[in-house]
Amino acid sequence: MRAEQSKYMTTIDIGGMIVVYNFFIGVLVMLSSEKIGALAGHVNKTYAQQIERSVRVSSLAFGSTIAGLMGAIYLMFFTLKIDF
């Protein structure tokens, strides 16, 4: 009975977990870019608006790039099983 149970067990796909984790991190950075920019604007009161705007845009771009890249990797390699 125990041998039959182990026959149906599958292993954990660590690569897929890392890609999905990075996808969610990219989405969270993208969604929190406004808060990150506001926090960065409090560092220097003289240039607060310029710092806030540039950090907001750069964190939005960084988060969307990571999320898009990880989503494409997951789609190509794990869903469609494309092999090079």
Image (spheres, rainbow, N blue to C red):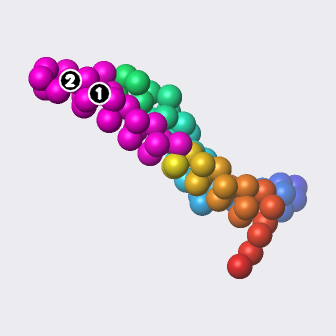
C-alpha span from label 2 to label 1:
6 Å
Where residue 82 sits, quadrant-wise, is bottom right
On the image, the x and y values in percent for residue 55 come to 32, 35
Q: Which picture quadrant has residue 3?
A: bottom right
Q: Measured from the top left, where is residue 4 in percent x and y?
A: 87, 59
Q: Position of residue 60 (x, y in %)?
A: 45, 37
Residue closer to the observer: 14 or 3: 14
Instruction: Please name the amino acid that badge 1 sits on.
Output: Glu
Look at the image and tell me whether residue 66 can be seen: yes
Tag shown at residue 48: 2
Residue at 65%, 59% (x, y): give it: 73
- Residue type highlighted by circle 2: Ala
The front one of 44 and 77 is 44
Q: Which residues are magenta?
A: 37-64
Residue 12 appears in the rendering: no
**Contact, mark 2 vs mark 1 (Cβ under 8 Å):** yes
